[in-house]
Amino acid sequence: MSKISTKESIWINILSRSRWKMDWSKTPSILRERYKNISDVNWPHLKVAILEEMNRECLPTDSETDSHSYEIFANQFNSVMLTTHFFENLFSFEDQRHNREGNLEFEFEIPEEYFRHPSLRTSNDFSKKERETISKAVSSTKSRMNFSKDGSFLISQLHKLEFISVFSFLEAYIESILVEFTNEAPKKASQASSNKPIHILIPETFSKINPLIMEVINGFEPDTVKFFSFCRKVRNLHMHNLGVVTERFYKDCMNENLLCHDRYTETGQPVTEYARPNFSFCDYIIKVGRPVNLSAITQPFRLLSREIVFISETIIKEDRIHKKVNGISEE
């Protein structure tokens, strides 16, 4: 029995949604120019590809005008991305070098020397036993994480560090702007950040500062906050179960409409052996007992996190300018 294709399944899901239209005329010009056209892009992965193209450079910073919350987030975000780029480029350079030297298998089977403890890299004493121990550990880890290539395993772990770091930075940013712009006591803001999931805290916080922030986020990509709810569950899965999908995770995501099923062409019945994230910009097979590869989720999460912080900072700056021009106290 044949199944509806991935692309068709996702496109049907997109068309079934009612998408709210944003009145871009009331937004700051920098946001209107940035998001008006991209907000109507619904094809799977295309919006992510456009955003990646738009965000090749570091997050812009200006110590004269940045809020304290944005300054911290931007510098943390940039430091992680510079580090990620460094290791991805370093891996690519090494792969190219090995290819030039006639070793075409570097990406598949990286020499054990690359996995040695850094303190041993100047030692010429690399025993057969140490090689076998490293090789066994790499093979076991790849098998556990459902990878065949050494390179894929390493990049997935790099993306895991990126994902968890950006998630933490975003949580810290929301907590920080609660204190900086709503006069919330630091202790109370910390409690709110600890007790409320990020997909609840984000709309609550932005609505307190300026409801336009959430309007622009929803106009740019209506599924942003819902996607963050899914990412929070994935983050917890990686922290507590090595990223392996549990029955509870699967059931909760289905109940909250965070996952959806393909359907059989002949009957229209759901294919229940697996599911996909219920978002047009994130296509990946989710199956009980199989690890979730964060490489498929980190990119849209990173890009959307960056955008909502940029949106909020832009509107906050506009509010500050308006108050200054009109002699309104910020207290």
Image (cartoon, rainbow, N blue to C red):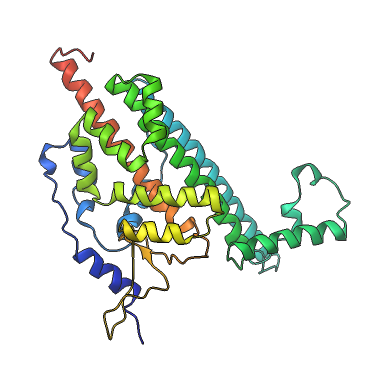
Point out residue 256 in the picture as x, y percentages from the top left corner: 31, 56
The residue located at (36%, 47%) in the rendering is 228
The residue located at (40%, 36%) in the rendering is 171
Point out residue 301 in the picture as x, y percentages from the top left corner: 39, 49
Q: Is residue 28 above or below residue 231?
A: above
Point out residue 269 in the picture as x, y percentages from the top left corner: 29, 78
Q: Can you tell which quarter of the image residue 318 is in? A: top left
Quick one: 263 or 104, which is closer to the camera?
A: 263
Left or right: residue 162 versus residue 173 is right
Q: Is residue 220 above or below residue 187?
A: below
Quick one: 331 or 264, which is closer to the camera?
A: 264
Left or right: residue 193 versus residue 328 is right
Quick one: 191 or 306, which is closer to the camera?
A: 191
Residue 62 in view of the camera? no
Q: Can you tell which quarter of the image residue 49 is in? A: bottom left
The residue located at (53%, 59%) in the rendering is 244
Left or right: residue 116 versus residue 124 is left
Number of labels in the image equals 0
